Image (spheres, rainbow, N blue to C red):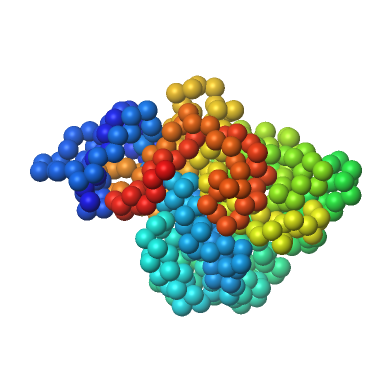
Amino acid sequence: MNIHIKNGHLIDPANGIDAQQDIYIAAGKIAGLGQAPAGFVASRVIDAGGLVVAPGFVDLSARLREPGYEYKATLESEMQAAMQGGVTSLVCPPDTDPVLDEPGLVEMLKHRARSLNQANVYPLGALTMDLKGEALTEMAELTDAGCIGFSQADHPVLDTTVLLRAMQYAKTFEYTVWLRPQDPHLGRHGVAHSGPVASRLGLSGVPVMAETIALHTILELVRVTGTRVHLCRMSTAAGLELVRAAKKEGLPISCDVGAHHIHLTENDIGFFDSNARLTPPLRSQRDRDAICRALLDGTIDAICSDHTPVDDDEKLLPFGEASPGATGLELLLSLALKWAEDCIDQEQQRLPQAIAKITADAARIAGLPSGQLAVGSVADICIFDPAVRWTVAAKALASQGKHTPFLGYELAGQVQTTIVAGHIAFQR
């Protein structure tokens, strides 16, 4: 299908475009910007007047719950949520059941995703077998099967020697290791940020040093091995200072933050609201302010949804017993826009910077060709209305996971059309 998107406000941070331009799509790729290519005849015209046309969003952490956890969510439901949220590329952690530590499992997941003809799925392979932190996986075989990096998800490696060997192996083949800094012992049974709120509510705490001590170890291993490491879901001001210093030193690291942690703090637990039970836990106001500053100065490279659908049976429990996680795919755009509105003074910079954090910057981290609208690139496109305000309600979410701490919030930014590889995958 040849598609002509006209009258839209095109924002493509990867190529520095912020202007009203038409887009012409042919054979699944972008055939022209501004002017139609020779001989182009549109079979479909989309009028994007008053709307923003951006690259399809790239989410660096979305648990699709397959295989093994279909009672929490299915590939079909979460792919539809991605389309409704304008997310055309998904990086999924390996903590499925069974764990993504065998090439056959990765190939099966990729095949299932392709058959739905919606978002592109990019799995992370397990760094160690069954995520136990003992024996390394066959990273080369997993890469051939389609993995773009290697992760322990939320399972820390207890033996630092194993982590060293894994990073040495990864460096040999220039693979990226994705790690969430988390000391395996400090705060192991914690459910909330160590501080006055947790103390007042009688909840076990996760101290800031659980992140910083793990970071010191990871950064020292990066110095020794030269391995490229992506730090997932940073949550503390002290941790971000370590990352800032390591980047100035020139270490090959990048990091992201979950969208929830940009806006919420430990106070949003309220009276034991299990929707606010997240991993890592919601931190202090000081930490949240540091996250906003780190996004502005580039210490944090990208925003991810940290999409983790949880079913009612595991969420509607006392706070300490509830499973951590929240749905986020359909909130990624709105939460990125809210960050820009709250933290960026120059109004004309808000849209480009917010979109960059969920397109070009995220794609660069994952090593993906998506996140841009250059002529010749695959036509993954999101068309959204930045002015529309919508209320987050369970019935408004396509995801099978209906739990989010933002239920009842009114947010700006609503996706109107999602195009994947030149076909219209969602239209509101």
Q: Is residue 287 left or right of residue 361?
A: right
Residue 83 in the image: x percent, y percent?
A: 44, 50
Relative image position of residue 288 (x, y in whole percent): 68, 37
Instruction: Quadrant for residue 310, please give it.
Output: bottom right
Q: How many marks?
A: 0
Q: Is residue 55 left or right of residue 202?
A: left
Tell me where residue 360 appears, x and y as whole percent.
42, 43
Compared to residue 93, the image places residue 204 above or below, namely above
Q: Quadrant of the C terminus?
A: top left
Identity of the residue furthest to the top in this view: 346
Name above or below for residue 149 compared with residue 279: below
**Residue 294 visible here:** no
Nearer to the camera, 261 or 384: 384
Query: In this orientation, which residue lies closer to the viewer: 21 or 168?
Result: 21
The answer, for residue 272, to whether it is visible in the render is yes
Closer to the camera in the image, 372 or 39:
39
